[in-house]
Amino acid sequence: MKNCTITCISSSPNTGINKPIIGFGFKTLFVLIYFCFSFRHKLCSVLFFSGVAPQYQSLSAMEARLLQSPSSSCFFSSGSCSINRYRFSSAIPSSPKPLSVSFPQKTRRTTNVVSMSKKDGDIESLSYKGSGVDIDAGTELVRRIAKMAPGIGGFGGLFPLGDSYLVAGTDGVGTKLKLAFETGIHHTIGIDLVAMSVNDIVTSGAKPLFFLDYFATSRLDVDLAEKVIKGIVDGCGQSDCALLGGETAEMPDFYAEGEYDLSGFAVGIVKKDSVINGKNIVAGDVLIGLPSSGVHSNGFSLVRKVVARSGLSLKDELPGGSTTLGEALMAPTVIYVKQVLDIISRGGVKGIAHITGGGFTDNIPRVFPDGLGAVIHTDAWELPPLFKWIQQSGRIEDSEMRRTFNLGIGMVMVVSPEAALRILGEAKNGDYVAHRIGEVINGEGVTYQ
């Protein structure tokens, strides 16, 4: 048999279905042997779980909902020896054989969510910090953690394995979930979850291998959970990685009724001689921006303050736009993996910044060697209507917008001038959309012109 991964897990009344077990009965062993023989020519993942308790009948019901299309993963209950196969999506390819390694903590990023401070006449100017998110405090925490775990600070954590690096990333979707609860739009939030992690690890040039998710709620709503998980499946398909497994936890009294929380974890791989780390960046290199679909998954604490102040309903049409405000805000995060890996394969890419919490101001300098900075030409692309509305309605200063939101550019690549000509030529031919948004200069930080 080739590339078959076998994991055994048991149910837990408090934490869901994700605890290892040591053994299982002969009936289950027989089924396992039969399965392995039947699928000996295919890549697959096999999960066993034991003793589904009565309180987890809703989990079993959710599992049954996901038996709709061709699968890459199979789940067995050793308690009944019944075979329940998760058929997530034929779009999700089987991944290369998962690597059994331990991951030290090499990367930690704080999830920034927003603030209010300065006055403009009698109207208060909103800010990320005033909305409850202190980016500076997050930066200080990372600095302190770096003393205990040297080497953190990149978009993904690198673990050496032979001639390659495993690259790991973990993230959530912040308070965008609050808008999902209000709008009832749950089918795209899973895409956001996958995007936040795989977009981080591709900045090192890594191809995502697999993804794991954590879904927690006070009481499992099967219909709602199905929508979220199908979004995760869609995101994995868009990034060519396998949904290897996850945790579904019911925690009564911990979350408000009808609410849930999500987190995700992705692992990719890149050859050591192909890793992108910014070390070769020099003054004169070019910054290429790839468009975002909207706010993506950062800055929603501030966004929610703006919505409350504006007096608009999420069902109202976005001023200057063609959709409702709720639809515009809930647009799923772009997954850049395939496009970025394709551009990388043709050479000239030296550094990549995923524009998340911290916006342009904090994220772009993360890829530069000491002594280098960037100048951004703010007229290089048109600010999307959603960001214009956010800034005007919240009376938000330019500096705050640039340190909180992606402003229509979700990924920035630092490339050689020759590569920039090639990329912009392909964009002009209609292969994709890309903008020359700035250059690398001698100095520090990011300036705007």
Image (cartoon, rainbow, N blue to C red):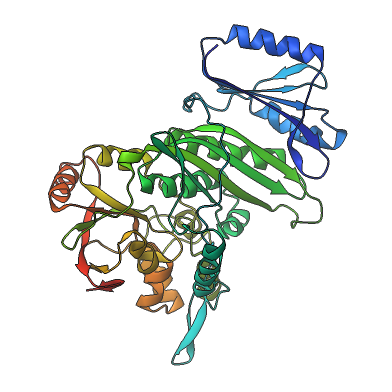
- In percent of width and height, residue 292 lies at 36, 53
Tell me the quarter of the picture where residue 173 sits.
Answer: bottom right
Q: Is residue 309 above or below residue 72?
A: below
On screen, residue 138 versus residue 272, left or right, reads right
Asked if one can make out residue 124 in the rendered structure from this viewpoint, the answer is no
On screen, residue 153 versus residue 283, left or right, reads right
Q: Nearer the viewer, residue 303 or 355?
A: 355
On screen, residue 390 versus residue 82, left or right, reads left
Please identify the residue farthest to the right as the structure is shown.
Answer: 54
- In percent of width and height, residue 43 lies at 52, 18
Q: Nearer the viewer, residue 294 or 84?
A: 84
Asked if one can make out residue 100 in the rendered structure from this viewpoint, the answer is yes
Q: Where the C terminus falls, by quadrant? A: bottom left
- In percent of width and height, residue 221 lies at 72, 42
Number of callouts: 0
Residue under the point 53% across and 29% down: 98
Q: Is residue 52 above or below residue 372?
A: above
Residue under the point 69% across and 29% down: 63
Q: Is residue 373 above or below residue 176?
A: below
Q: Where the N terminus falls, by quadrant? A: top right
Residue under the point 63% across and 25% down: 86
On screen, residue 161 versus residue 55, left or right, reads left
- In percent of width and height, residue 312 lies at 51, 68
Q: Nearer the viewer, residue 357 or 100?
A: 100
Residue under the point 48% across and 77% down: 127
Q: Nearer the viewer, residue 22 or 176?
A: 22
